Amino acid sequence: MISASTFSNRAGLLALASFLVAACGSAGGKVVSTPPVADAEPVQLCDAAPAQYHIGQNVTEAMGAAILRETGARTLRWGPPRSAWTMDYRQDRVNVRYDDEMKIIDVTCG
């Protein structure tokens, strides 16, 4: 059986908890909220279609810069022959694979 003092203590704790929850949710009758956080930089989406004509051309630094510009990607990842790549997908990255003769064989996004 619950004694009167136990009931009184529980009721007091419940009242205190209710007060604290209400105090955290408002300040001076106004709802407190955090301002929205803007992204540091907008995401650039890659589109590999405009760079497909580079397939068969030699790998050069200038070619990489052109592929970045034409695809709209933020980063370029070169893929040497027989190399392993991570499977993470990044919508702002262009992937350029090349063969043993340093000829571009594939241009994709991700």
Image (cartoon, rainbow, N blue to C red):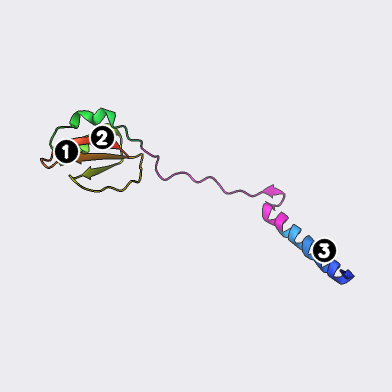
Does the magenta stretch mainly form a helix, a strand or a loop?
loop
Spatial separation of the CA atoms under disc 1 and disc 3: 75 Å
Relative height, residue 85 to residue 6 (above, below): above
Q: Earlier in the sequence, mark 1 or mark 2?
A: 1
What SS does tag 2 mark? Answer: helix
Task: State the residue position of label 3.
Answer: 11
Q: Nearer the viewer, mark 3 or mark 2?
A: 3
Residue 30 within the magenta-colored segment of the rendering: yes
Tell whether 37 sits left or right of 87: right
Q: Position of residue 47 (x, y in %)?
A: 31, 32
Quadrant (top left/top right/bottom left/bottom right) for the N terminus: bottom right
Residue flagged by tag 2: what amino acid is it?
Arg
Task: Report the amino acid beneath label 3.
Answer: Ala
Which residue is rendered at x = 89% and y = 69% of the image?
4
Which one is in front in this view, the residue at disc 1 or the one at disc 3? 3
Q: Quadrant of the C terminus?
A: top left
| Location of mark 1 (residue) | 62
Q: Which residue is mark 2?
A: 69
Q: Secondary structure at mark 1?
A: helix
Residue situated furthest right in the rendering: 4
Say what secondary structure mark 3 lies in: helix
